[in-house]
Image (cartoon, helix red, strand yellow):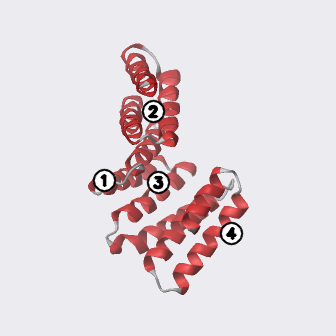
Amino acid sequence: LRFWAVTFALEVGDHAGALALAEELLLIGQSAGDPLGEGVGYAMLSRARGAFPDREGEGIALAQRAVEILEPLGRAEWTGLAWVRLGVEHHRAGHLHAARNALLHALALRRAEPFAGLVASALISLGAVLFDLGEAEAALDSYREALNLALAEENQTAILGALLGLADVAYCFGDGALAERSQFALSLAASAEQH
């Protein structure tokens, strides 16, 4: 329950509440001797701390700890979460190559055992890193795949994230064939939403 409470608190901008809930989640996992709960606690604590400005270092360390705890458990959905968190925190800190590597690892885990919404969210995070690296074609491909998955899953949050990413690519790199591909993806999304 605290996992979802942290998520919802962050979505409504209650960063202090999210931080307190994430700390409770970690404490519960540690107190119960539950490595899954502890690892997820570290992952969510990285997310809550990362929501504050200038705390990227803390977010990276917490996400790395989550990876270390969760990786040996063989639970791809949760290990994928930890790797996404590590990628996002590296991205926030400006470590673009480390972010790309972490997100590619997360994506491989999530593709091996797909769970609704998780592959699309990893692709959106990867698209943002690729965009910042100036790899417009790769970013476009990542956002387009995320959009197709999000539309199939009717995941409104991921649809919005993918559309915003596509719009960024079209705006910043939009010339010639790339602009046409971006516009085509956006028109497909509009067509799918009408149906």
- Residue, x 64% and y 55% (percent of image)? 10
Labels 4 and 3: the sequence-earlier one: 4
Separation of disc 2 and disc 4 at Cα? 37 Å
The secondary structure type at the circle numbered 2 is loop
Q: Where is residue 2 in the image (x, y as percent from the top left)?
A: 58, 68
The residue lying toward the viewer, choosing from 77 and 66, is 77
Labels 2 and 4: the sequence-earlier one: 4
Residue 141 visible? The answer is yes
Labels 1 and 4: the sequence-earlier one: 4
Residue hosting label 2: 134
Few, some or many residues within 10 Å of mark 1 (<14, 14–19, 20+): some
Q: Position of residue 128 (x, y in %)?
A: 48, 40
Labels 3 and 2: the sequence-earlier one: 3
Few, some or many residues within 10 Å of mark 4 (<14, 14–19, 20+): some
Separation of disc 4 and disc 3 at Cα? 23 Å
Marker count (numbered): 4
Would you say the residues marked 1 and 4 are in contact, meaning their CB atoms lie under 8 Å apart? no
Residue hosting label 4: 20
Residue hosting label 1: 108
Amino acid type at circle 4 is: Ala
The secondary structure type at the circle numbered 4 is helix
Labels 1 and 2: the sequence-earlier one: 1
Labels 1 and 3: the sequence-earlier one: 3
From the viewer's perspective, is 158 left or right of 180?
right
From the viewer's perspective, is 88 left or right of 6?
left
Front tag of 2 and 4? 4
